[in-house]
Image (cartoon, rainbow, N blue to C red):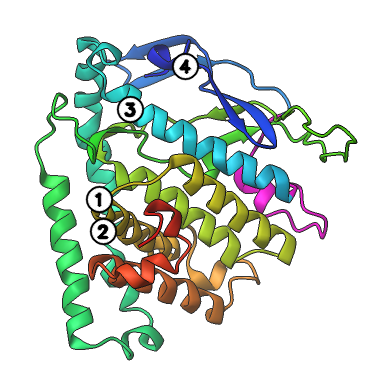
């Protein structure tokens, strides 16, 4: 995949900025089947920092300005939409690439299922503050979501069966896998009536080992859930605001989808939020900011997204952070 994408650099124009997005250049790869090891040498991305680190900085002055948060989110959304379209083209997926992804896909799909839909109900059950407020119908809906996802992940991989919702996906699309330069200049006022877009640092999409055939809502919903997580656990208001602006920019950049796709994205974003509990050490070993109240809050938020998405609640989605996915509803 890195080889296929190595010559593909996207330039994204936003009203306030211009950014370049690419994947690291692959210099060397060797697979030793006898030793069961892989050796890979990638481009050295100097002075880079991941987007997550910028959004969780404890500093009272944000590492990511609000202008650049919006622009970065927009760039990522626009790039992801173009990637989903590009990889669906037969000319973009030669037989060798399809074969490699097919081989990789089974294990990665199993892993993704194991750390998301296979455990989210068990996680919710750990919080009586949440389960006590669930109705019998809502509990049944959560079980239905798991059953649906179990069927999705059992679906036979069909590399030529790309559609608007299914195809080759990145598989682990979150802020920790987005690199950019830490030298982000603040936008200076200008007397020019129509200033030229300000260049953003290069953005690099990394960690492609989870590439698989899957529902595109997995990529979109994971990033949305991750940005909501950044906002929920933010150390200060500036970082929380930056996460929300990046989220809004991301949705704006990806663009409108069908209502059914938007509901499916809501479900996956909710699962991403709930399974935060399983990503890391036990709760009693987490940092001080991960209070019981805040942990319960993120689980409640995730459950709300899952149930509203599964229930195809048009009014809710039209008033939520996801409204940009469907426009006016």
What main secondary structure does the magenta stretch of the protein show?
loop
Q: Are marks 4 and 3 in contact (CB under 8 Å)?
A: no
| 267 lies above or below 194 | below
Per the model, the C-alpha gap separating discs 2 and 3 is 26 Å
**Circle nearer the viewer, 4 or 1:** 1
**Circle nearer the viewer, 4 or 3:** 3
Q: Earlier in the sequence, mark 4 or mark 3?
A: 4
Q: Is residue 68 magenta?
A: no
**Circle nearer the viewer, 2 or 4:** 2
Q: Earlier in the sequence, mark 2 or mark 3?
A: 3
Q: Are marks 2 and 3 in contact (CB under 8 Å)?
A: no
- Residue on which the image places disc 2: 117
Query: Quadrant of the image for the N terminus?
Result: top left
Q: Are marks 4 and 1 in contact (CB under 8 Å)?
A: no
> Which segment did they paint magenta?
48-65
- Residue on which the image places disc 4: 40
Q: Earlier in the sequence, mark 4 or mark 1?
A: 4
- Residue on which the image places disc 1: 113
Q: Is residue 31 left or right of residue 156?
A: right
Per the model, the C-alpha gap separating discs 4 and 1 is 27 Å
| 306 lies above or below 41 | below
Residue closest to the far right: 191
Residue 107 at least partly seen: yes
Q: Are marks 2 and 1 in contact (CB under 8 Å)?
A: yes
Between 104 and 322, the residue placed more toward the observer is: 322
Per the model, the C-alpha gap separating discs 4 and 3 is 28 Å
- Residue 114 is situated, as x and y percent measured from the top left of the image, at 26, 53
Q: Secondary structure at mark 3?
A: helix
- Residue on which the image places disc 3: 85
Q: Is residue 169 left or right of residue 151?
A: right
- Residue 260 is situated, as x and y percent measured from the top left of the image, at 24, 55
- Residue 205 is situated, as x and y percent measured from the top left of the image, at 51, 30
């Amino acid at each position: 995949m890195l080889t296929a994408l190595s010559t593909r650099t996207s330039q994204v124009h936003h009203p306030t900025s211009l950014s370049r997005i690419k994947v690291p250049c692959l210099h060397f790869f060797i697979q030793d089947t006898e030793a069961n090891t892989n050796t890979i040498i990638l481009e050295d991305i100097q002075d880079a920092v991941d987007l997550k680190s910028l959004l969780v900085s404890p500093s009272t002055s944000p590492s990511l300005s609000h202008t650049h948060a919006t622009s970065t989110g927009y760039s990522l959304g626009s790039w992801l939409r173009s990637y989903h379209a590009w990889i669906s083209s037969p000319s973009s997926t030669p037989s060798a690439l399809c074969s490699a992804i097919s081989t990789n896909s089974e294990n990665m799909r199993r892993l993704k299922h194991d750390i998301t839909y296979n455990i989210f109900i068990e996680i919710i059950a750990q919080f009586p503050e949440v389960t006590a407020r669930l109705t019998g119908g809502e509990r049944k809906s959560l079980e239905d979501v798991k059953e649906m996802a179990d069927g999705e992940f059992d679906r036979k991989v069909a590399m030529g069966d790309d559609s608007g919702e299914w195809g080759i996906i990145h598989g682990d699309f979150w802020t920790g896998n987005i690199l950019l330069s830490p030298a982000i200049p603040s936008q200076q006022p200008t007397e020019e009536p129509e200033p030229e877009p300000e260049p953003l640092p290069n953005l690099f999409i990394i960690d492609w080992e989870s590439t698989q055939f899957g529902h595109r809502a997995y990529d979109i919903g994971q990033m949305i859930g991750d940005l909501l997580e950044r906002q929920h656990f933010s150390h200060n208001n500036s970082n929380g605001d930056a996460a929300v602006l990046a989220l809004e920019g991301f949705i704006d950049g990806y663009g409108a989808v069908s209502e059914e796709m938007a509901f499916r994205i809501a479900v996956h974003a909710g699962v991403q939020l709930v399974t935060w509990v399983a990503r890391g050490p036990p709760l009693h070993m987490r940092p001080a900011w991960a209070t019981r109240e805040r942990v319960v809050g993120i689980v409640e938020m995730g459950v709300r997204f899952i149930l509203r998405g599964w229930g195809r609640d048009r009014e809710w989605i039209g008033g939520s952070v996801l409204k940009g996915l469907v426009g006016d509803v």
